[in-house]
Amino acid sequence: MSQSLLEMAKDLILAQIHAQKLSPEDMHAALQQTYSSLLALQAQEESNGIVAVATPETPAAPVNWRKSITKHAVTCLACGVSFKQLSGRHLREHGLDARSYRAKYGIPPHQPLSARAVTAIRKQIVQTTRPWEKAPTYLKAQEKAKQAVAQKTKKAQRKRVMRTKA
């Protein structure tokens, strides 16, 4: 070989950059991958194809979870299937739960794993039905607050009566 492997890899990457198929930011990773692939090919060539050389596997590109959640569908980042909502049952098929799925793909903890339209409909239902107002603890707290207000008004009335008498 008249050219070194590194020079060959550099020329291949520069050609991809000039053809606008590779951004300059991705140049370093592509250069390393191309060089290691050329090394593997050289080793295989020197051994006359007898030894199978494993080429290094390309690292998975970081997944943008924001693109997986659209208005009408949410796409599972593990398998690529679209749903209205990612259920716990589906996530268990990948050996995950909602918390570990969010952690694996960098999704914030309070981000719903459902389509935006589904989330909006649920939010509207909650706002109209106001289920917290039907909860026993809420009702009990409201009753206590009413009693406290009634006691204050009674005390205030007694003070007024006492002042008028005096």
Image: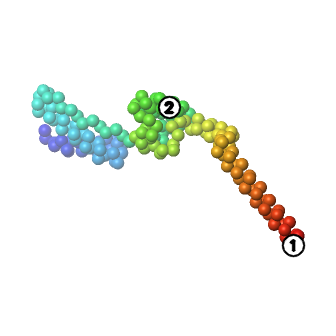
Disc 2: CA contacts within 10 A as few (<14), some (14-19) or many (>=20): few
The three-letter amino acid code for the residue at tag 1 is Ala
Q: Is residue 64 left or right of residue 41?
A: right
Q: Residue at x 62, y 40 (%)?
A: 123
Residue 51 in view (yes/no): yes
The quadrant in which residue 30 appears is: top left
Q: Residue furthest left?
A: 47
Q: Between residue 27 and residue 123, name the one nearer to us.
A: 123
Tell me the residue that label 1 is attached to. 166
Q: Which residue is mark 2?
A: 87
Where is residue 27 drawn, in percent x and y? Answer: 31, 46
Disc 1 residue crowd, few under 14, some 14–19, many 20+, Cα 10 Å: few
In this rendering, the answer to whether 154 lies above or below 22 is below
Q: CA distance from mark 1 to mark 2?
A: 72 Å
Q: Quadrant of residue 6?
A: top left
Nearest the viewer among 129 and 49 is 129
Amino acid type at image mark 2: Ser
Residue 72 lies left or right of residue 75; in this view the side is: right
Q: Which numbered dot is residue 22?
A: none
Does residue 13 appear in this view?
no
Residue at point 13% right, 38% down? 1
